[in-house]
Amino acid sequence: MKAFEVRAPHDFGIVDIDAPQADAGEVLVSVAFVGICGSDMHIIHGDNAFVRFPRITGHEFAGVVAAVGEGVAGVTAGDRVCIDPVINCGECYPCRIGRPNVCTRLEVIGVHRNGGFEQHVSVPAGNVHHLPESVGLDQAALVEPYTIACNVLDRMQPHDGDALLILGAGVIGLTILQVARAKGLTDITVCDVIDERLEVARSLGAHHAVNGQREDLEAVMSERSGGEGIPLIADAACVPALFPQLARIASPAGRIGLLGFDTTPSDLVQLEVIKKELTIVGSRLNNRKFPEVIEMLASGRLDATALVSHRLPFAEMSDAIHLIDHHPERARKVLIAFDS
């Protein structure tokens, strides 16, 4: 069967491999759609510290169950499903306190083990989520990025009436915007440096849009908040050098959610954090958010198709990667379709 394999940084392509089997406790999925994520691009560029090469990437995918392994209950061939890529041990301290997404022995499908950029993939049965008929397989392939948004918003614990600043209008910034609106936040500002992305943010319901290259974000947010600052800041731009500014923009008792994996140190002015009693939270992957997002899609509170800028067949993976690398202003979510 065909698969997209990253052999080493900048060394990738479509290869022929043996089809996997559904071992005990596993489900074999015939993949229909896969989204290309920024973390997939980091693996391709050699910027992901967690990946083990060679690797078949892809952690945003959905398809149809082809077979089930011994001991699997509640899943049958023909079921339409999407896959939570987070695999945890269930025994370590984070798992014991309900934080399996930071398990000490964490594995991520598409990073630590083979993922969805192959015609068939075998996954643990516990990671399979059934889909209601109202959710198409193309939408279901995008459940995972919405779980990232749900996770960071939950980590920041919004209160009624809180204003939210989202830094970055890429895919994750846009999912945060959509989920925040679905959860009832009514004052959302999105900042980016690419006008095309800001236009998309406006179309998806951003109440304010700021181009950080042309406007002084700190001054804009101070004026907008009457000098009080912003209670919720989600950093989907993931630029470490911006952290001091975010701490200044935050209101007293504000919460800043960080999503980046950059190893560059950030300056932290302790006085700024302490005098405001800021809460700074990291957010990694998702903590059992798949059912919540699937329900939001089924109810129409989220529109995953609005994220998709391009749909390409699996045979054009190289073109898709070139598009994302060289035209970020045009490429939001690039969705890859396998032949049925």
Image (cartoon, grey):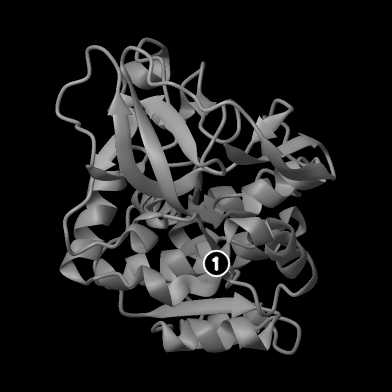
Where's the N terminus, which quadrant? top right
How many marks can you see? Answer: 1
Relative to 67, is 189 on the left or the right?
Answer: right
Q: Nearer the viewer, residue 286 or 114?
A: 114
Q: Pointer 1: what residue?
A: 333
Residue 112 rendering spot, x and y as whole percentages: 59, 26
Q: Is residue 262 above or below residue 101?
A: below
Residue 135: where, in percent of width, then height? 24, 62
- Determine whether the residue tagged by mark 1 lies in a helix, strand or loop: strand
The amino acid type found where label 1 is placed reads Lys
Seen at 51% across and 16% down, the residue is 105
Residue 26, position in %: x, y?
34, 21
For residue 94, side relative to residue 18 (left or right): left
Residue at (30%, 46%) from the top-left corner? 290
Task: Decide: few, some or many residues near mark 1? Use Cα within 10 Å; few <14, some 14-19, many ≥20.
Answer: many
Residue that appears at 23% across and 71% down: 301
